[in-house]
Amino acid sequence: MEIIRVNASKEYDVVIGKGILTSLGERCVSLFGKSRAVIVTDSNVAPLWLDKTQQSLQLAGVEASVFTFTAGEESKNTATLFELIEFMAQSKLTRSDFAVALGGGVTGDMTGLAASLYLRGIPFVQVPTTLLAAVDSSVGGKTAVNLTAGKNLMGAFYQPELVLCDTDTLSTLPENEFANGMAEVIKYGVIFDKDLFDKVSGGDVKSDIESIIARCVELKRDVVARDEFDKGDRQLLNFGHTMAHSIEKCSDFEIEHGSAVAIGMVIAARASARLGWSDEDCTQAIIDANKNNNLPVECAFAPADLADAALSDKKRTGGTINFVVPEVTGRCVLKKIPVDVLYQIAECVN
Ligand SMILES: NC(=O)c1ccc[n+]([C@@H]2O[C@H](COP(=O)([O-])OP(=O)(O)OC[C@H]3O[C@@H](n4cnc5c(N)ncnc54)[C@H](O)[C@@H]3O)[C@@H](O)[C@H]2O)c1
């Protein structure tokens, strides 16, 4: 078992280990006393992991009610958010009670936002059950729902009190969802840590997943400690994401986020080499890592369409756009680029 202490506007532990869901109740009681809870989960995760979660809380003397929503990104909206907040009120949760987000990034993002709003803030616990949520969304306090105008446009920075990641939950995750999480793991390697990149680039990572998750959480912990509110270094985590968002949009969201990030990293690395920003061309290494982890490396969209889609993204500021490029494997930098350079970058799709 690994325990990583996060030091942001709130301090909390991220506990990672096999079979540790049974310890959730005791850990919550030691944080909140014998209070009450709402468990928030989705329709895929509920039949798999809800019983164990409820049992653990019950055994520790926590009375929990359950809010289940239809699985998928389509549910991450204001309607489900308000239903959840109403449910918290009907369950008569007080400020000494808490919410548990049992699921992937959709569950975690929405539960965190509801927890930040209900009674002007109640505590919440993240129990990530996807690899993406374990290595990324459950840590760092970004919460959000989508608006009609775009993804994650309504949100708050609101840190959890505990993140408990039972690696057993990943055993039921479909292979494509595991691969989506691996795109984020590869991303951490390229941005911050060549050793991590080398460790995962051959694929076949499942036997070592606890230490891989722990390393990603340490890297995220460090960047959040430096820049909790996303004004500087934290933006490095957007490596691969500018083009990824375009690819998702151009595919009408048929291409999943992790796959889009995988392709986006290849484009950014190729652009970095072609435009003379990198000390080495790490494109091939990223292509190999993606392939070995069941992730794609290319897409068929026209470069101009990708660039146009990126320009409608919320991360544009005036005439420039922030773009993350690798200098070497294990070190990325944030570049403020004029929008016309984005068209040259999009040409690097192949
Ligand atoms: N807050 C942040 O910092 C941050 C960072 C990255 C991504 N995100 C957000 O995270 C979301 C994506 O997260 P995600 O990929 O975890 O999506 P998700 O929560 O939709 O989970 C993906 C799918 O896996 C299923 N699932 C979850 N756990 C399972 C398990 N153990 N066994 C079987 N099926 C399981 C879900 O029901 C869903 O169908 C996006 O909304 C994105 O915006 C947030």
Image (cartoon, helix red, strand yellow):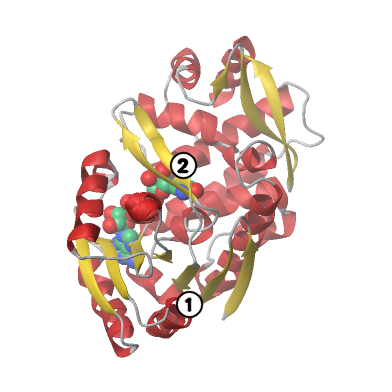
Look at the numbered disc 1 and give the secondary structure of its residue: helix
The label nearer to you, 1 versus 2, is 1
Question: In front here: 5 or 201?
Answer: 5
Name the kind of residue labelled 2 in the image: Pro
Which residue lies under the disc numbered 2? 296
Question: Disc 1 vs disc 2: Cβ atoms closer than 8 Å?
Answer: no
Q: Which mark is residue 31?
A: 1
List x then y, in percent, for residue 130. 40, 61
Separation (CA) of disc 1 from disc 2:
42 Å
Residue 246 occupies which quadrant of the picture?
Answer: top left
Residue 205 occupies which quadrant of the picture?
Answer: bottom right
Question: In front here: 90 or 223?
Answer: 90
Q: Is residue 313 above or below residue 117?
A: above
Q: Is residue 71 visible?
A: no
Name the kind of residue labelled 1 in the image: Leu
Q: Is residue 292 above or below residue 307?
A: below
Q: Which mark is residue 90?
A: none
Q: Residues within 10 Å of mark 2 (few under 14, many from 20)?
A: many
Q: Residue at x 38, y 85 (%)?
A: 22
Q: Is residue 111 above or below residue 166?
A: above
Q: Is residue 99 above or below residue 281?
A: below
